[in-house]
Image (tube, coloured by chain):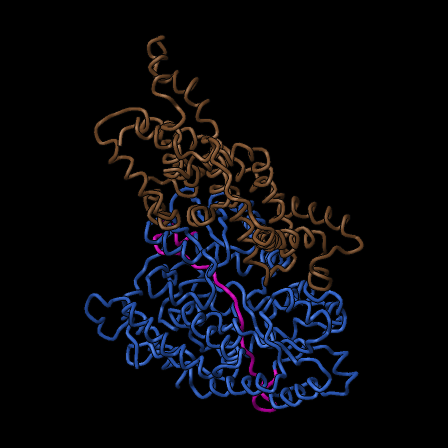
Chain colours: A blue, B brown
């Protein structure tokens, strides 16, 4: 099966990328297999760096019951705003925290730079596979055999927020396919509004759409990374949004800006295809539209399909050099599966858990007033189980995001197209991989 | 260049000691100057005005109402926002303010003393390698603090001082520009004859420095203090790299961390705005309090 093949070779390529200086590991992934994981003797203190607000309160729950494994929370700005760079600095200086929050799209970068501890041999880790949504487990193992590099924390399954009242009033059918979505866009434009806003700088949103379409930006073949930002699915998604942009049927405000919020608040935006955490973004950014929103699955490329994309999400990784991987992984498992911890992390930090048990939590079972009492989390739980489990991020995502978003910015300004931006991103990404001596197929 | 010539040259060209007024300006050029200043004033004050206005709005009103004018219930909202700011996350913002005050206040004070002693020594004592030392210090002015942050992190890692108060405090004590300014000012304002008189009267060098020289150098010291205070208060990159424990954060880093969470925790938007307003108040207060020293000190420093 193609899927399996991709995973196994991905693992191989990563390992060979690591052993660049030396000889090839001869086709086996043994390099990461025989990590032993034993409990430390005596009381242990772990450091855990995260930027999720309120995580210190969640950790307090743990510390109360585990006097021998005390966890100390460290914090900072979100990953790409500085914490990842701090991790790399600390790894270099040899004083990295035991545990760190790392988003899925940044994990390959840490893996390639050998910044993660393989905790597969630690008690309970390998067996935890079934506790997490399939695709998130794929993200933390890279498909490698006997390897687990992090415990999935949260996820961002995507669905479509839409203004139920406006659609009803205008007699427009709520789109279930992307074709219907484009048709609705035209009708909505005729009424002087936009069907949605194209987020020119959120390249990971775009990737989520490619992900839904079945595309694959990064993969590995013959022990080399393969970059494929311009595959046929990416091209399809790019051309689709390009058309909406050219017809002026979508706005191009900077995401999460004041004007963006205002546009939603004033009812100029009829839909937002977004991740589960978008629910709270809407509630605070567009308070005047309370009760008028609803959630439906993402529009499909093929009628009757169920595919969903994902936007965001992170893991709890054990960083290289931790002296207590056993205790660290024990804590990471608790943090991301314990119902009480998950509920509190959702309440204080807005996390939507990657654990399958999320749907049983009180916070996700009831109706939400802002969405007219709809049980919106059922939609997202469904979406989560329909996310393609075989999606690989590249080792230089920050750079790729920057390059593509530059091109998207130009395209929304009318020069070049979204596809041009992807082509440029493709070339720049290959360059970036080469400059880091990561083997890449051209 | 000896200290004596430094004194005479600076005295001659000092703008403070009565430089003649230029030719009468025409109304046109005065008008143009006023216009340009007016435009710049507007340019600099509008963001602060926006900050003040936005601080008095709820999250929804920031986007939904006129950006540069208040809403009907601005005053209660402002105080509610302020209350939220100081209670959010167990009042960690207050802690950040105190940290900033500690880093900037104490750091600038000690930094000024060190810079003053160093500059004074370079100006008033003749010893071998004096110019070499001065040139090395001077070249330090050219190296941006940001470029030093990562090397400092690696060094502090070696001595296990990262993520401590010292990691931010110690590097803040150093001010090459302060040394430069102190030397220039000491050379210009502390007469060598006075020091000789003090020596004849049996005063020790240290006592002379602290009782006589520092008073003469006061305007420069205030200038150095202000420069240092602002630099440390606004310093962001060093704390970003050094600190992990949010109880140690200065206010700049804390607000930045909050701001990076806005897309996930949208209610932080209001707190970041109010927090930004509160965080510039100490700077404004310090400036207003020390303003009259500031300008005279600046003038002296510009002559070299």
Identify the image quadrant of the C terminus of chain B.
top left
Name the chief secondary structure element in magenta.
Answer: loop
Q: Is residue A17 magenta?
A: no
Against B208, residue A396 (above or below) is below
Residue B8 visible to the viewer: yes
Against A386, residue B101 (above or below) is above
Against A146, residue A52 (above or below) is above
Q: Quadrant of residue B303?
A: top left
Q: What percent of the width, then of the height, locates residue B187?
A: 36, 28
Residues shaded magenta: A299-327
Residue drawn 36% across and 18% down?
Answer: B206
Front residue of B97/A442: it is B97
Identify the image quadrant of the N terminus of chain B.
top left
Front residue of B275/A371: it is B275
Residue B272 visible to the viewer: no
Q: What percent of the width, then of the height, locates residue A238?
A: 50, 84
Residue drawn 34% across and 32% down?
Answer: B9
Q: Is residue A324 magenta?
A: yes
Q: What percent of the width, then of the height, locates residue A13?
A: 30, 74
């Amino acid at each position: 099966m193609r899927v399996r093949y991709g995973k196994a070779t991905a693992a191989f390529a990563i390992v060979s990328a690591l052993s660049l200086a030396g000889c090839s590991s001869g086709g086996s992934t043994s390099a990461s297999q025989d990590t032993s994981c034993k409990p430390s003797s005596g009381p242990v203190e772990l450091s855990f760096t995260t930027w999720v607000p309120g995580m210190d309160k969640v950790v307090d729950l743990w510390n109360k019951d585990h006097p021998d494994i005390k966890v100390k929370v460290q914090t900072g700005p979100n990953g790409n705003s500085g914490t990842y760079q701090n991790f790399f600095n600390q790894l270099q200086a040899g004083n990295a925290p035991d545990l760190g929050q790392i988003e899925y799209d940044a994990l390959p970068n840490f893996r390639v730079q050998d910044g993660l501890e393989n905790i597969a041999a630690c008690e309970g880790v390998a067996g935890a596979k079934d506790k997490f949504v399939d695709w998130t487990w794929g993200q933390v193992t890279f498909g490698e055999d006997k390897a687990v590099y992090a415990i999935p924390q949260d996820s961002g399954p995507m669905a479509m927020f839409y203004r139920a009242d406006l659609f009803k009033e205008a007699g427009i059918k709520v789109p279930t396919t992307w074709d219907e979505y484009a048709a609705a866009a035209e009708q909505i434009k005729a009424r002087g509004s936009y069907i949605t806003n194209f987020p020119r700088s959120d390249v990971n949103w775009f990737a989520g759409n490619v992900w839904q379409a079945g595309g694959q930006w990064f993969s590995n073949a013959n022990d080399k990374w393969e970059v494929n930002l311009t595959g046929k699915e990416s091209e399809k998604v790019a051309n689709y949004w390009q058309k909406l942009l050219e017809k002026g049927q979508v706005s191009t405000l900077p995401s999460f800006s004041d004007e963006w919020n205002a546009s939603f608040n004033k009812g100029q935006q009829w839909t937002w295809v977004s991740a589960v955490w978008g629910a709270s973004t809407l509630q605070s950014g567009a308070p005047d539209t309370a009760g008028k929103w609803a959630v439906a699955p993402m529009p499909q490329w093929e009628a009757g399909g169920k595919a969903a994309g994902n936007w965001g999400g992170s893991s709890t990784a054990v960083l290289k050099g931790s002296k207590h991987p056993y205790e660290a992984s024990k804590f990471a498992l608790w943090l991301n599966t314990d119902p009480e911890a998950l509920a509190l992390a959702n309440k204080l930090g807005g996390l939507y858990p990657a654990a399958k048990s999320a749907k049983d939590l009180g916070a996700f079972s009831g109706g939400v007033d802002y969405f007219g009492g709809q049980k919106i989390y059922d939609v997202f739980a469904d979406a989560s189980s329909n996310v393609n489990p075989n999606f690989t991020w590249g080792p230089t995502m920050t750079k790729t995001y920057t390059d593509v978003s530059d091109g998207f910015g130009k395209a929304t300004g009318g020069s070049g197209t979204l596809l041009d931006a992807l082509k440029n991103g493709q070339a720049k990404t290959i360059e970036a991989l080469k400059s880091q001596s990561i083997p890449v197929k051209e | 260049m000896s200290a004596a010539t430094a004194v005479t040259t600076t005295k001659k060209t000092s703008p403070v000691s009565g430089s003649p007024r230029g030719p009468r300006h025409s109304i046109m050029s005065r008008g143009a100057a006023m216009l340009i200043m007016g435009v710049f004033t507007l340019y600099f004050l509008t963001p602060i005005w926006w900050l003040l206005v936005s601080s008095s709005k709820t999250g929804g009103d920031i986007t939904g109402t006129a950006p540069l004018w208040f809403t009907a219930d601005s005053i209660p909202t402002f105080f509610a926002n302020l209350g939220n700011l100081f209670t959010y996350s167990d009042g960690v913002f207050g802690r950040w303010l105190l940290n900033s005050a500690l880093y900037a206040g104490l750091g600038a004070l000690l930094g000024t003393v060190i810079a003053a002693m160093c500059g004074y020594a370079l100006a008033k004592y003749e010893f071998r390698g004096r110019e070499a030392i001065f040139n090395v210090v001077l070249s330090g002015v050219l190296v941006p603090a940001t470029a030093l942050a990562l090397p400092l992190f690696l060094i502090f890692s070696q001595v296990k001082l990262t993520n401590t108060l010292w990691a931010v405090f110690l590097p803040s004590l150093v001010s090459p520009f302060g040394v430069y300014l102190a030397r220039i000012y000491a050379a210009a304002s502390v007469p060598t004859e006075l020091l000789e008189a003090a020596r004849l009267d049996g005063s020790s060098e240290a006592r002379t420095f602290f009782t006589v020289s520092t008073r003469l150098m006061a305007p420069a010291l205030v200038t150095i203090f202000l420069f240092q205070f602002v630099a440390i208060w606004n310093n962001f990159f060093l704390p970003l790299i050094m600190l992990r424990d949010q109880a140690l954060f200065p206010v700049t880093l804390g607000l930045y961390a909050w701001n990076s969470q806005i897309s996930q925790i949208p209610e932080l938007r209001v707190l970041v705005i109010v927090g930004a307003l509160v965080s510039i108040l100490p700077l404004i207060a310090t400036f207003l309090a020390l303003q009259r020293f500031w300008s005279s000190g600046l003038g002296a420093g510009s002559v070299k």
